[in-house]
């Protein structure tokens, strides 16, 4: 045995669309998205951040277009990036048209704050003309006035009704190249709205808990909300909205997917919290390994356990395993089997060497 047993989640089958070269929905892998926080008019800084997000593993990157200079800047930005770009549009329909004409692969709009159905129709024409997909982005913080009057407050039913209203507008114009999100900063509100939506339509769904907060609370809220829905088979693409460096959003997104065996990418480190039984400094070792192995893209499971209580058991289901023993008596496992011993001072270099060797092996196969 070499890897942890795979447990299938039966994904809800949705229509498939494309955002640039990335397929969303159907049998396509669940994609991970993030968003730049640079001024889009600062073209150099925006290109740099998009490429950093791409290197971290982002499948799709969203860029804000609050003014004409930003939407027109996409023409230059797109020349220097490989990942599909979503233009984030609010309020002004002309920004969406400019972004589509500038080459954006997708537009994120909330039809409810665009101003009128006629303006939405103009956006749909521009999207069709440029083979540009759209995300209907319903948000609890910007619901239509009549829905707030009807429901008195943002609630799952209001988000759901807003989304279906937009779907009808799109379908009436024979536009089907879209995905949908119904986000809230409240986990339970978001989850219920997504459940309602998934029962009614089969368009691809973008998952997220919006404005989730800083790294720790935001990661927890995102993991609970997104994770619950993914376990129910709901969701085709995700974003963890964090008040942080957006690269962290990508990393947390992949950790959510890896924890559910929905995607395998990079080194998945199984490690213990450490205790007085540890045979080497587990916490420091894992921190160093996470940093030094971050360049590995191939899916590899590495267990780093400080003692023999759980170490051998975890190593059985890992491509590479380390179990703490005495000072010079730590056991390395390969493909679930005891292989050789390593001294404390050699742990880091030995594990890195083994992981890189495994990575090369996977690349060549």
Image (cartoon, grey):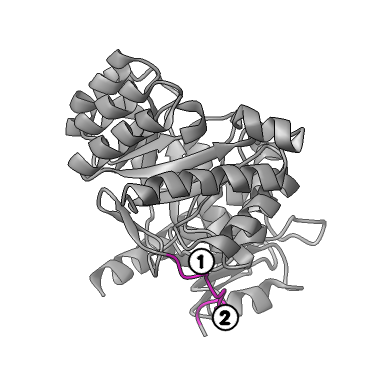
Majority secondary structure of magenta residues: loop
Q: Foreground residue, 135 or 38? A: 135
Which x, y percent locates residue 50? 34, 33
Residue stretch rendered in magenta on the structure: 2-14
Q: Can you say whether 331 is above or below 170 in the image?
A: below
Do we see residue 141 in this rendering? no
Tag 2 near tag 1, CB within 8 Å: no
Return the residue at label 1.
262
Q: Position of residue 114 (x, y in %)?
A: 45, 27
Residue at horizontal 39 percent and vertical 46 percent from the top: 170
Residue 63 in the figure: left or right of residue 286: left
Q: Quadrant of residue 314?
A: bottom right
Most distant residue in the right direction: 276
The residue indicated by pointer 2 is: 5
| Residue 286: percent from left, percent from top | 59, 51
Residue 7 colored in magenta in the image: yes
Locate the C terminus by quadrant. Answer: bottom left
Question: Element under label 1?
Answer: loop
Indicate which label's residue lies in the foreground, 2 or 1: 1
Residue projecting furthest to the bottom: 1
Above or below residue 44? Residue 290 is: below
Q: Quadrant of residue 6?
A: bottom right
User: Foreground: 199 or 358?
Assistant: 199
Q: Residue at x 56, y 61 (%)?
A: 200
Residue at x-position 23% and y-position 43%: 128
Query: In which image quadrant can residue 18 be found?
Result: bottom left
Query: Is 326 left, or right, of 32 in this rendering?
Result: right
How packed mark 2 is, by other alpha carbons closer than 10 Å (few <14, some 14-19, many 20 or more), is few
* Magenta residue check for 53: no
Answer yes or no: is residue 365 visible: yes
Q: Secondary structure at mark 2?
A: loop
């Amino acid at each position: 045995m070499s890897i942890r047993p795979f447990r299938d989640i039966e994904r809800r089958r949705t229509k498939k669309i494309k955002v640039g070269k990335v397929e969303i929905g159907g049998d396509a892998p669940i994609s991970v998205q993030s968003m730049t926080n640079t001024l889009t008019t600062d073209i150099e800084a925006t290109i740099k951040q998009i490429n950093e997000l791409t290197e971290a593993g982002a499948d799709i990157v969203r860029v804000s277009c609050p003014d004409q200079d930003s939407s027109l800047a996409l023409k230059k930005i797109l020349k220097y990036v490989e990942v599909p770009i979503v233009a984030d549009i609010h309020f002004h329909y002309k920004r969406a048209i400019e972004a589509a004409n500038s080459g954006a692969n997708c537009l994120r709009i909330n039809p409810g704050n665009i101003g009128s159905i006629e303006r939405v129709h103009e956006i749909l024409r521009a999207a069709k003309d440029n083979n540009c997909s759209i995300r209907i982005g319903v948000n609890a913080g910007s619901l239509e006035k009549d829905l707030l009057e009807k429901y008195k407050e943002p609630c799952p039913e209001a988000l759901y009704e807003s989304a279906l209203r937009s779907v009808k507008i799109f379908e009436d114009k024979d536009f089907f190249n879209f995905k949908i999100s119904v986000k809230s900063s409240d986990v339970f509100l978001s989850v219920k709205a997504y459940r309602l939506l998934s029962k009614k339509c089969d368009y691809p769904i973008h998952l997220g808990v919006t404005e989730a907060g800083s790294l720790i609370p935001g990661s927890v809220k995102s993991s609970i909300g997104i994770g619950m829905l993914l376990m129910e088979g709901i969701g085709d693409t995700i974003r963890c909205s964090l008040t942080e460096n957006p690269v962290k959003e990508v990393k947390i997104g992949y950790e959510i997917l890896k924890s559910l065996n929905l995607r395998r990418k990079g080194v998945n480190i199984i490690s213990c919290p450490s205790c007085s039984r540890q045979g080497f400094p587990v916490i420091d070792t894992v921190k160093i390994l996470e940093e030094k192995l971050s360049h590995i893209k191939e899916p590899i499971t590495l267990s780093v356990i400080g003692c023999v209580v759980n170490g051998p058991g975890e190593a059985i289901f890992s491509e590479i395993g380390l179990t703490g023993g005495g000072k010079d008596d730590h056991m390395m496992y390969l493909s679930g089997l005891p292989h050789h011993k390593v001294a404390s001072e050699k742990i880091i270099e030995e594990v890195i060497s083994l992981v890189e060797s495994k990575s090369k092996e996977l690349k060549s196969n």
